[in-house]
Amino acid sequence: MSQLTAFLLVLSLCAFAPLCFSTKTKGGKLYPQFYDHSCPKAQEIVRSVLAKAVAKEARMAASILRLHFHDCFVQGCDASLLLDSSGSIVSEKGSVPNKNSARGFDVLDEIKSALEKECPRTVSCADLLAIAAKESTVLRGGPSWEVLLGRRDSRTASLSGSNNNIPAPNNTFPTILTKFKRQGLDIVDLVALLGSHTIGNARCTSFRQRLYNQSGNGQPDYTLDQSYAAQLKTRCPKSGGDQNLFFLDYVSPTKFDNNYYKNILASKGLLNSDQVLLTKNEGSRELVKQYAENSQLFFEQFPKSIVKMGNISPLTGSRGEIRTNCRKINS
């Protein structure tokens, strides 16, 4: 067979397999079939371990989803958030957005351990987290999507990046939007991704200022429904009770649906960063109304936006490593 004939044969085979030349995430591209041959049961293993954890504690789904978000906004989606402090590494777990609130690391350890048994040194912690975020959404009744895979794990963490890049509950709307735009995400992604607050909890400390001193003048936030505020005050006093937990969506707290947007329209968004979607920007206000009226629209956009988020600066090819333990770099 001549070289030309052989080349044409390969080309014709690739016509039926568009990812033929992508086996090594060529050009840094991620794709769903990355583990089809090296670890075909990867997604099934993640799903199975996670399902048990969420059955034991419904809140865990939101916690895992949040970890994916907090990881991707710092150095890209590279599992830097999962690293504990050691040697020259100062863990992102101690940052203001993560301290006393980031959780679910033990569940990820359990998933990683099962993956290492099935296919050692193959599935990255960054990919594990991306798959777990999707499965968490589905387990609580949300939409599904094809997870793009092929990320590798960082050998560094950034405490300052975690402190500066992750939107805070009391940030102004322009600040939140700037933090999203810095990651290549737009206003549609912002409103859709904040819809993940349809599940999970927030601590008293993350919204207390809205109840007592929103603008530094000793007055509550006028954009918060007053009867709802009175209810919140019973368990979120002026001082103390910092770690007391409140549902982000008090209507259907464990179901992934569009009630989050309906709550905002009723002035019952829990965090300032939720309510400003309605009060501070016309574009976000329109999107809130659309998603409140049409859950299918939200269920179509959320996967698009989270896939886009999962594509922030991934390490691919020979960059980074495949950690065997998500908490520390390989020795």
Image: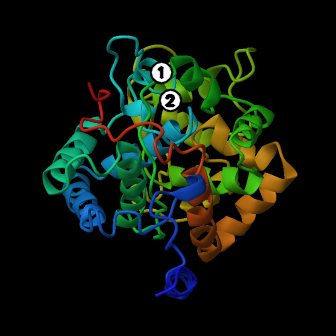
How busy is the neighbourhood of tag 1: few (under 14 within 10 Å), some, or many (20 plus)? some
**Where residue 225 sits: x, y (%)?**
65, 43
Type of amino acid at the residue the image marks with label 1: Pro
Q: Return the x and y of residue 259 as percentages of the image width and height.
A: 55, 61
Q: Disc 1 to disc 2, how far (Cα)?
A: 6 Å
305 to the left or right of 98: right
Residue 128, label in figure: none
Q: Position of residue 248 (x, y in %)?
A: 49, 45
Q: Which residue is mark 2?
A: 233
Q: Is residue 307 visible?
A: yes
Is 311 in front, or is 289? 311
Residue located 24% across and 49% down the image: 57
- Is residue 306 visible in the rendered image? The answer is no
Disc 2 is placed on an element classified as: helix
Q: Reply above or below: 192 against 170.
A: below
Q: Which mark is residue 237?
A: 1
User: In the rendered image, which quarter is residue 67 located in?
Assistant: top left
Instruction: Identify residue type, mark 2.
Output: Lys
Q: Does the residue at mark 1 contact the one at mark 2 (Cβ under 8 Å)?
A: yes
**Residue name at image x 73 percent, y 57 percent:** 188
In this rendering, would 108 be left or right of 173?
left
Foreground pick, 98 / 11: 11
SS at badge 1: loop
Q: Is residue 99 above or below residue 48?
A: above
Q: Quadrant of the C terminus?
A: top left
Residue at the outermost front position: 2
Q: Residues within 10 Å of mark 2 (few under 14, many from 20)?
A: some
